[in-house]
Image (cartoon, helix red, strand yellow):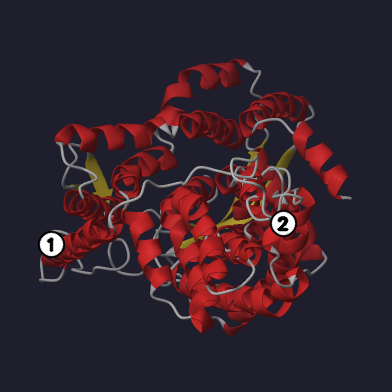
Amino acid sequence: MLTAIERIGNKMPDPAIIFLALIASVILLSQVLDWAGVHATYQVDRQRPAISEPVYQGGSSDIVEAGPTEPPGPGSYRIVTETSSVKGLLTVDGVRYIFTSFVDNFRNFAALAIILVVMIGVGLAEASGLIAALIRKLVGVSSKSTLTFIIILLGMLSSVASDAGYLVLIPLGAAAFMSVGRNPIAGIAAAFAGVSAGFGVNFLITPLDGVLVGITNDAANFADPADKIDLVSNLYFGIASTLFVTIIATAVTTRIVEKVLGDYDPALAPTAGGDGEVEPAVAEVAPEAESRGLAWAGWGTLAAIAFIVLLTAPPGAPLRDPVTDKVIGDSPFMDSLIVIIMFVFLVAGLCYGRGAGTLTTKDQVLATITKSWAGLAALLFLFLLIAQFIACFNFSKMPDVAAVKLGDVLEHIDVGAVWLLLGVVIISAIINFIIPAAIAKWALLAPIFIPLFLRLGVPPQTVLAAYRVGDAPTNVVTPLMAYFPLIVVFTKRYDKNSGIGTVVSMMLPYVIALSILWTLFFLAWYLLGIPLGPGAPVS
């Protein structure tokens, strides 16, 4: 079975090739459906036109139409009948659209700017050694009884800078377990579960959140532009899920994985300089320099937060809504979260670098930022293709027609929202085996799921939460996951006979436990009607 999975996985093309094929498929399929006259007629609630007035937003020379700030009253909406017909992309209009919108599609792709801006701060913090130093410090002060929980929790939080978790925390997890007389391979499993099986939820707002929210809004925009979510739309659920997944993964590690692996036999380790040896992921820093850097980073972070508070807390502050004076919701503060995250990480990274001596010149600082952007080259090209796919898919009206048709079928067979959300979890988990990248997968699924659930009265933030639950657990058993081969290398460091089968077999208990229990946790959250985030109701 494992051999078959590995063979099939090795034959799967790069995600960029997959999206090129999808774009070609959309173009051809849209033309066939256009010739066939495929369409859908449906009734929808539309808000009556409201009087607006032009206002000027700070930082922009564009005039923005600002509508009424009060909730719409009775009679503000009306039922209208609309028809969506599939538009062929090989027609005159379709070909014209492909050529004239190509640059705009990429430029307007929200994830593009988000990832570039955030990586200025996160990339600098990672390159300075701050992320690695924080992980080492927290692992070092934990007791044996809490070691597993802390390593897994740090893995969950490391998604702020995903490379740091894979490259630093996983080998440190093995070393930490071995230092207290436990099997280091179990330490690898625990850290890998935290970094990857819980990827997508966090106590903090991460760069991934910005990308997923951007794709979600792009998918919802052509169904109903009013259905826009923000970065904190899954925050409450993310915080609770982080703790829940950490507890479950800790129990799986101590009660199942460690018992199956048994005591560690040092004779299994390869000889020095053998194939199992890997270079340390992060250069060593003297303990006194690291402590000084962390202290400077702490003061710098407090100063950065204080600065943001000054811009937000006082009435009429720049980051409060100029009309309602609110902070949460549709406000400058919420619109600035990406910049705030970048700013805090940038300040903390600079302070750590100066204190620890890892960043001493302006040239080094600029070089680390340039390097962090250079490492995004492949992702940016994938963004280009994703943007074209979403644009072509939306232009064709196929998502509209598919959502209406599927919605009609589901409404007639009376399938409840719970079963549909369960279907999102299962489909996401299955597709994760062939498209492990969370961004690429959501770019494919969001244009299908979001309009469908909007038609059935389920908001985008709930669908996105279901996707997070289905997406993460199977990360640890798919050989197509980018860091999976590295985990095999780390395992070989302690067992020269280990391989893909070793990693998959020790991670399967996490997949089974999290897939079942996390799904039940999400369904319970939905049925209890708990908000998923500030101003983000579950239904």
Quadrant housing residue 231: bottom left
N-terminal of the pair, mark 1 or mark 2, is 2
- The residue at the point 52 percent across, 22 percent down is 97
Amino acid marked by disc 1: Phe
Between residue 351 and residue 75, name the one nearer to us: 351
Residue that carries the numbered disc 1 in the rendered image: 307
Quadrant housing residue 364: top left
- The residue at the point 48 percent across, 23 percent down is 102
Between residue 396 and residue 26, name the one nearer to us: 26
Left or right, 445 with respect to 129, comes to right
- The residue at the point 74 percent across, 76 percent down is 259
Residue that carries the numbered disc 2 in the rendered image: 268
Amino acid marked by disc 2: Leu
> Could you tell me if residue 364 is visible in this image?
yes
Q: Please say if 439 is above or below 397.
A: below
Left or right, 46 with respect to 519, comes to left
Residues packed near mark 1 inside 10 Å, few (<14), some (14 to 19) or many (20 plus): few
Secondary structure of the residue carrying numbered label 1:
helix
* Position of residue 407 measured from the top left corner of the image (x, y, whole percent): 72, 57
* Position of residue 142 measured from the top left corner of the image (x, y, whole percent): 43, 77
